[in-house]
Amino acid sequence: METGIKNEIELTVTEEMTAERVGSGLLPVYATPEMIAQMEKAASTSVEPYLEEGQGTVGTKMNVDHLSATPVGMKVRVESELVEVDRRKLVFDVKAYDEAGIIGRGTHERFIIDNEKFLGKAEAKRTAGRDE
């Protein structure tokens, strides 16, 4: 996998995406957790075609500034670009814009994983410590 892979997602802010609905605030504006989720989606889906069968990616770090509020009904565009590949670690620049300009920017890290092995480790937590 090489740097330069880009992706873009467009959406319109709905009531369900507001801070007051998702519990991250009291106002009816685009929620930070919703913006971050779309940034992760843009990054993860951008590299899916480049993964081997049985592989996936998981988000491990997000460092984002939410710069400006966006009202319900306004369009948002989220962009990701793969800027670093270090073995299994992938680093993305992420940005979000509404119709008035930039509303968020930052970096996002994901790791390439073997899906079955990853899920096996997660499921093993269910039984860990039960015999004590």
Image: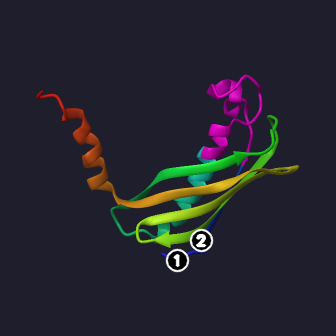
Q: Can you tell which mark lies on residue 2?
A: 1
Q: Give residue 13's position: percent from left, percent from top.
A: 74, 39
Label 1: element kind? loop
Q: Which residue is mark 2?
A: 5
Residue furthest bottom as drawn: 2
Amino acid carrying label 1: it is: Glu
User: Position of 99 compared to 85: left or right?
Assistant: right
Q: Is residue 26 magenta?
A: yes
Other residues around mark 2 within 10 Å, as few (<14) / some (14–19) / many (≥20):
some
Q: Quadrant of residue 46?
A: bottom right
Query: Residue at (31%, 52%) from the top-left corner?
Result: 118
Q: Secondary structure at mark 2?
A: loop
- Give how far across and how far down residue 114 sits, in percent: 32, 60
Quadrant for the C terminus, please: top left
In the rendered image, the vertical position of residue 12 relative to residue 93, given as above or below: above
The residue lying at 54 percent from left, 63 percent from top is: 91
- Residue extent of the magenta highlight: 11-36
Colouring style: rainbow
| In this picture, residue 71 sits left or right of residue 116 | right
Residue found at x 70% / y 29%: 19
